[in-house]
Each structure stands twice: as structure tokens, then as C-alpha cells.
Amino acid sequence: NTFINYDLPLRKVFNKMSFLLRYDMMTDQSDAKTADEETGRLTVTDYKRQRLTGGITFSLSKAFRTDLRLNYEKYFYAKNSIAKESEQDKVVLELMVRF
């Protein structure tokens, strides 16, 4: 897994803008409930994937630390994998407030 971040200071409404690039991956997983009846081997229920995320974050530090993030996540699967709806290419808008 790899994460790259570059912060650019701002002086107006937001105090910084951050650019990010992240790579991560996950191997095949099983829910430990589904098994092949003949062999007894666990069945893959969450397929191996790689993900590349690029995004931008605007940070505000007033009474509470607040981040507004906009990311694009690109997923890569092997040919015969079945991707869950939540684990497919997507744009994510996130508001995070820490207090």
C-alpha cells in the first residue's frame, strides 16, 4: 500500500488544499460461512482487487477541524472476479468534522 500527499497552504476560507494519490490492494476473502460442498473449501465471497485513488481535500481549522474531500476510486479486478456494487469505480464526496 502506498500513499502520497502534497499540501498547498491557502489564506482565504480554507487554510490548505491537499492533493492525494493512494494505491492499495486486497487478496481474496471469504465470509467463512460459504463452502464448496464437495471439497469443504471456503468459497471466495469478496474477490481480490487493487484500487487507485486520486483526490483533493480542502481543510478548515476554526472551532473544529473540518475536511471536504473529493476522490475518484478506480478498481482493478481479475477477469473472472465478481465485483460488489460498493467496490466498483466511483466518485466519493466526504465531509469530515473532528472535535
Image (tube, rainbow, N blue to C red):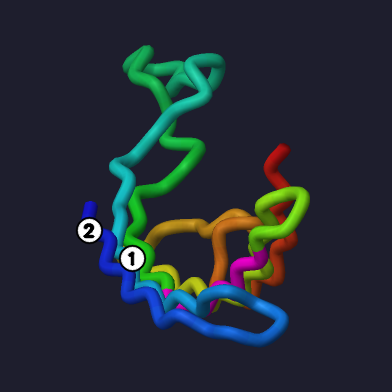
Secondary element at image label 2: strand
Residue 99: percent from the left, percent from the top?
Answer: 72, 37
**Start-end of magenta stretch:** 54-60
Q: Is residue 10 left or right of residue 19?
A: right
Secondary element at image label 1: strand
Which amino acid does the dot numbered 2 rest on?
Thr
- In the rendered structure, does residue 56 fall within the stretch colored magenta? yes
Asked which quadrant contains residue 60, the reply is: bottom right
Residue 19: percent from the left, percent from the top?
Answer: 41, 79
- Mark closer to the chain start, 1 or 2: 2
The residue at which mark 2 appears reads as 2
Which amino acid does the dot numbered 1 rest on?
Arg
- In the rendered structure, does residue 5 fall within the stretch colored magenta? no
**Residue visible at 53% across and 84% down in the picture:** 10
**Residue visible at 29% across and 42% down in the picture:** 27
**Residue visible at 58% across and 85% down in the picture:** 11
In terms of secondary structure, what is the magenta stretch mainly? strand
- Mark 1 and 2 residues: CB-CB less than 8 Å, in contact? yes
Specify the label residue 74 is tagged with.
none
The crowd level at tag 2 (other Cα within 10 Å; few <14, some 14-19, many 20+) is few
Vertical arrangement, residue 7 with respect to residue 51, above or below? below
Report whether residue 79 is seen.
no
**87 and 64: which is toward the camera:** 64
The residue at which mark 1 appears reads as 22
**Residue visible at 66% across and 86% down in the picture:** 12
